Image (cartoon, rainbow, N blue to C red):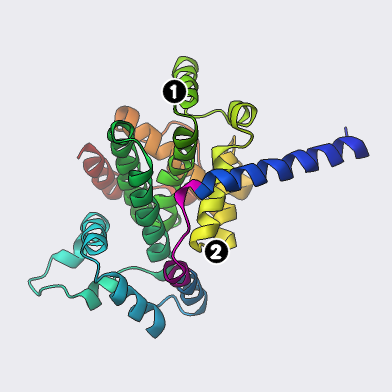
Amino acid sequence: MPHNKKTVQKESRDLAAEWEISRKYSGLYGSIPSSFGSLIRGLHIDQAKNQELSFASKWQMNRLLRSDSMKAAYYFALRTYRKDMFAGTKPLTIANLAVALKPQDLAALLAVLYLFRRARHMLDPNEWKFTAPLIHTRADLGGQIGVMMENVGLGFGLLAGVMRYLGMLAFIVHDKSGFGEYRRKLKISNKAYDLRAERERWGCSHVQICSNLMVSIGLCSDTVESVRRGFEMKELNVNSARTKSYAVRVTELWIDSLILNLSPPKAPSSGFYDLSQEDLSNLLEEAKK
């Protein structure tokens, strides 16, 4: 049954208010350095053009990796997702590291690394000790799934693994006691999240917050929309199996199942995301670690 005009207008106003509130929560992460946002946007342009890093992106990456802390985090990520790079005997240079990933995957990895580091400074140390292992585990698993499933890809695997939880952290910073109560209710109801409850308590959902974070850091609109729709997807519709939104939801199902019992999810998904027996064995072996 179609909504009447007044109902549609009210819902439109409510939705606009939710997004406005969510921007305030995402603002708790602080301003993104213009040079960093420029690099992320440039990488998406590179991906659209020829899937190789441009001279400008290589230069910016070399500059970024002069930071010891960023270089260490990036090096560790490559050790996790690109083991093939470390099989030889030749020493790796910053120039080698800078071009190790496709532009789209590199953009997602840098975004996740930056927001993870910002979250560490935002949260109370005791809360961070509780939260960091969860995010780290989901990043590792999401990335591994993305690498194994070509139709997901490393970038979307990472975003599917951690962006939901990076969005939730803003609620903890703003309302620690309220989030503790929310977390207890989720545990009782055996839910990972409750978008309706979030809107009722905080005026927006964590999905809206993480969408704002992805926009502010420079990820392209297609990527942001795919992640948002994937996070809001309630059922796997085979008609949308070849979309990145579907890939995001499939990745979440795999991560949840691997964390719970080290096995593939029982929920049906398109053969578009099937793994060979060898890849499945490798993924389960990585998940055990």
Provide the secondary structure element on which disc 2 rests. Answer: loop
Point 11% across, 70% down: residue: 88
Q: Residues within 10 Å of mark 2 (few under 14, many from 20)?
A: some
Which secondary structure lies at badge 1? helix
Q: Is residue 174 magenta?
A: no
* Residue 270 is at least partly visible in this image: no
Tell me where residue 234 sits by quadrant.
top right
Instruction: Say which residue label 1 marks.
Output: 180
Quarter of the image with the C terminus is: top left
User: Can you give x and y, in whole percent of width and height, for residue 186 in the image?
Assistant: 48, 21
Residue at the left extreme of this rendering:
89
Instruction: Please tell me whether residue 287 is drawn above or below residue 32 in the rendered image.
Output: above
Q: Position of residue 19 (x, y in %)?
A: 66, 45
Q: Residue at x 29, y 31 (%)?
A: 126
Residue 182 visible at all: yes
Quarter of the image where the N terminus is located:
top right
The answer for how far apart the CA atoms under marks 2 and 1 are is: 33 Å
Tell me the crowding category of disc 1: few under 14, some 14 to 19, or many 20 or more residues within 10 angstroms, Cα based: few
Image: magenta residue range? 28-40
Q: Mark 2–mark 1 contact, CB under 8 Å?
A: no
* In the image: residue 248, left or right of residue 278: right
37 in magenta: yes
**Residue placed farthest to the top in the image?**
188
First along the sequence among labels 2 and 1: 1
Majority SS type along the magenta span = helix
Q: Which mark is residue 220?
A: 2
Residue type, mark 2 in image: Cys
Amino acid at dot 1:
Gly
Q: Nearer the viewer, mark 2 or mark 1?
A: 1
